[in-house]
Structure formats: C-alpha cells, structure tokens
Image (cartoon, grey):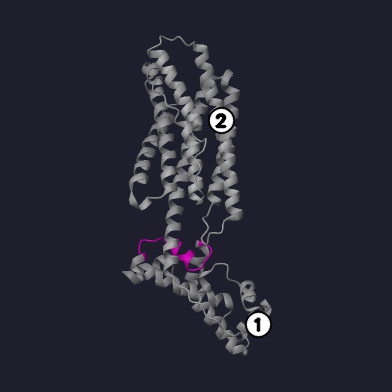
Amino acid sequence: MVFLRSLIISGAIHGILFFLVLAFHKKYKSASNYYIALVVLFLSLNNVYYWFINAYKEQQSIIENLYVPWAMLVLPYFYLFVQSFLHKKVEKKYLFIPFYFFLLGHSIVLCNNLILKRIISENSIEIFFSLEEYVLVFFSSYILIKIKMIIKEYERNSKEKIKKNIHWLQWLLIIGTCFFIFLFLISLLTHVTNPVLLKFTRHVLWIGLTFLIYLIAYFSVYYNILYKERNVLRATLKKDTLKKDTSKKEEDFVKDIKSRIIEEKWYLEKEISLSLLSKKFNLSESYISHVFNQESSSNLMTFINELRIEEAKKMLLNKEFSNYTIVAVGLESGFNSKSAFYKAFKKETKMTPSEFKKKNLS
C-alpha cells in the first residue's frame, strides 16, 4: 500500500506541473490542450486529497472536512476536450450540475460537523456519500457514451482537409472502459466481504485512471502540434490551376499528366491514384497506366513519390521549418504514414530523412 500511495502522490505532483506547463506555455496554447490540462489538474487534486487521507490517518476527520468532489469534474472536462480536439462547438450545458450539487452537499456536511453540532444523522450522511459514488459512475458512463457518439460523427461527417488521427483515442477509451468495468465489478464484490481488498482495488483504480489520462494528455499535445505544423506547411504550398486539352498524342499526353501533377501539386494529395486520375481526365485506368509506362522511364506512383521526396527535401532544408517534426513534413509531402515516407525516402536517397537533414544542414 505504501508503494501505491507513493505512485499516487508522485503522479499528482507530475499532473500539477503538467497543468502549469500546458496552461501557460505559449507553444501549447489551444482550447483542447487547456481542457485536457484541467482534466489532469482535477484528477491530481483528487489524488492529493486521498493521499493525505491515507498518509495522515490521525488527522483524517479534519482532512475529510476539506473534501471537494474534484472527480465530478474529470469526465465533464474530458468531454469538452474531445469536442475541442475534434473542432466541434463546445457545449457545456448540464455538465457541471452534479459537481455543484455535491459541492453544496459537502458544504452542508461541513457546516453540520463544525457549526450545527451534528444535527444531521450519520446514517443520512452515509446515504449522501453512497449516492455520490453511484451518480459518479452513472454520470461518467453517460459522458463516455456521448464521447463515443462525437467520435463516430467526426469519422462519418468531417469535411476537414486535414483530419486528425483519432484511432489512438478510440483504443485508449476502449482499454480504459474495459479496465474500469472490471475493477468496478471487483469493488462491488469486495465491498462487504473484504474492506482491505476494496481499499487496494480503489488505489489501483485511481492509479490506472491517472495513467490513462496522462497517456491521452501526451498524445493530444503531440497530435495538436502535428496538426498545427501540417496546417502551416500546407499554407505555404501554393497551388496553381492549369487547363490543358487531353486530346493529344500519347507522348504529349504523358507530358500533360506530369505537368498537371507538378503544377497543380496533385502529388501532395495522399489520395492521388490511377483511379482519381482516370476521373480527372475521363479516361480508363488501364489506358493511363499503359501510356505512362510506355512513354516514361518510371511508372506513375514512382514518379509521384519522387516528386513527394523532392518536396520533403525542400521542407527539411527550409530553416523556417527546422523545429517541425519529420512526421509532419512527410504527411504534408503527400505520404499517408510515417513508415511509407521513411521507406520511400531511404529508397530514393539511401538515407533516412533525419540523416539527410543532419548531413545537409550541418
């Protein structure tokens, strides 16, 4: 138990420092980072309270009078984080009613203990505390369902040119939900039969929740930076439109395809493919592939990847983007993943993007 308590307080201190950095550092300034920072803060404050309860048992009755239902704020602010992270309009309606209700309830209990000379029975106070636990469980479940609905809607209806990667969020939510359902069931089973095991289970529950929230917080900061960098990189890439007649000889037709791919920067679109080109030129995929292979020294996708790598080289050597991540450069060059970018880049240049950048900027 001492080890678990040490984990809780060290995690709480880390959480408070994390909040201060995220809330006040200009580099991380965004609405979603602000909300996830508050999630971490309220979770940390809740953990600090329980650490004091366990560390100073002789003053437990005094510390219990200082209780604030911080746990009631964790999921509501996490809900606001998800809305903001996915660029949805933030809705706060009814989210904080349980917190204010139980904050008022604990204020009445405090007055009862200190001023009213305990005119409210212990049994009534115990019922109130039990009600708080059940409301927390069911209210949290409701918010998690709402979050799942928001994520599904984003996947189905988002029309953003740069969509945020949310697979990590989905998996962490699934893992977290399964973990806490399991521990909640254990808590119910041990509530009467084994109070010591119940206390241990609750420690594990809060440590697990803290670890999960920290993972989500760090991932969200990373993907917010990545999203911001990609938008800046995309804004620098100017696209010109060029109309050409496709009724030409095969050699001229290939030149036309190459010209439009280059001048309209189609190679920066990760969705570009034979299928997409056939729609743009109103020609069959097989014809475009045949003509391109016949009249060009490389196939279509090799040509496109060569252009993407050249674009990536320019960005890697541009000192304006020197602090941007390699992943952001690869994605804005048209590649659909980090692995695809590294593989193509190394095949073309015989070195990784990092090695190329280091060699040419040193």
Relative to 219, is 114 above or below? above
**Is residue 4 highlighted in magenta?**
no
Give, as a three-letter code, the residue at label 2.
Answer: Val
Q: Which residues are magenta?
A: 321-337
Q: Secondary structure at mark 1?
A: helix
- Residue 350 visible, this orientation: no
Tag 2 near tag 1, CB within 8 Å: no
**Residue at (56% x, 30% y) in the render:** 137
Give, as a three-letter code, the residue at label 1.
Answer: His
**Residue at (59% x, 40% y) in the render:** 145
Examine the image and state in which quarter residue 217 appears: top left
Question: From mark 2 to mark 1, how far is it between C-alphas?
Answer: 62 Å
**Is residue 335 highlighted in magenta?**
yes
- Estimate how packed mark 1 is, as few (under 14), some (14 to 19) or many (20 or more) residues with alpha carbons within 10 Å: few
The x and y percentages for residue 166 are 54, 51
Relative to 102, is 123 above or below? above
Apparent side of residue 242 relative to residue 31 in the rendered image (left or right): right
The x and y percentages for residue 25 are 33, 48
**Residue at (39% x, 61% y) in the render:** 324
Please give the residue where the numbered disc 1 appears in the rendered image: 290
- Estimate how packed mark 2 is, as few (under 14), some (14 to 19) or many (20 or more) residues with alpha carbons within 10 Å: few
Apparent side of residue 69 relative to residue 297 in the rendered image (left or right): left
Q: Which mark is in front, 2 or 1?
A: 2
Image quadrant occupied by the N terminus: top left
Image quadrant occupied by the C terminus: bottom left
Q: Secondary structure at mark 2?
A: helix
- Residue 246 visible, this orientation: yes
The x and y percentages for residue 109 are 44, 17
Q: Nearer the viewer, residue 268 or 344?
A: 268
Q: Nearer the viewer, residue 108 or 39?
A: 108
Please give the residue where the numbered disc 2 appears in the rendered image: 137
Residue 219 badge? none
